[in-house]
Image (cartoon, helix red, strand yellow):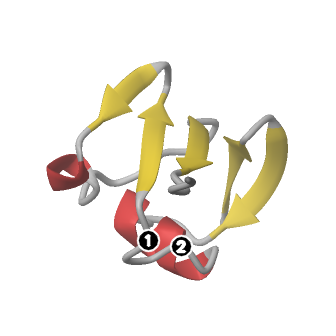
Amino acid sequence: MMTLKINGEPREVADDLTICALLESLGLGGKPVVVEWNEEALSPSEFEKILSNDDRVEIITIAAGG
């Protein structure tokens, strides 16, 4: 297990977790999101990066409105 800071809150997750797998575990897989990893904005093509202990991840969901 490792600890990540997700949206400012510490959370225990499995080792060798990708950003994509993290999103799936949070119920956000396939949904429009913006992800910042250690203060770097990522494109969806980079979601296969493997997370490390103490990484900081910010996840913002995108919602359309009218």
Which of the pair 1/63 is nearer the observer? 63
Q: Secondary structure at mark 1?
A: loop
Which of the pair 16/56 is nearer the observer? 56
Amino acid tagged 1: Lys
- Residue 53's x, y, as percent? 58, 44
Q: Is residue 7 left or right of residue 57?
A: right
Q: Is residue 58 left or right of residue 23?
A: right
State the residue at coordinates (44%, 71%): 31
Q: State the residue position of label 1.
A: 31
Image mark for residue 28: 2
**27 shown above or below 33:** below
Q: Residues within 10 Å of mark 2 (few under 14, many from 20)?
A: some
Q: Are marks 1 and 2 in contact (CB under 8 Å)?
A: yes
Residue lying at the far front of the rendered structure: 66
Which of the pair 65/34 is nearer the observer? 65
- Residue 52's x, y, as percent? 48, 45
Q: Quadrant of residue 34?
A: top left
The quadrant in which the N terminus is found is: bottom right
Q: Is residue 31 left or right of residue 7?
A: left
Residue lying at the far right of the rendered structure: 9
State the residue at coordinates (44%, 66%): 17
- Residue 63's x, y, as percent? 55, 56
Q: Nearer the viewer, mark 1 or mark 2?
A: 1
Image mark for residue 9: none
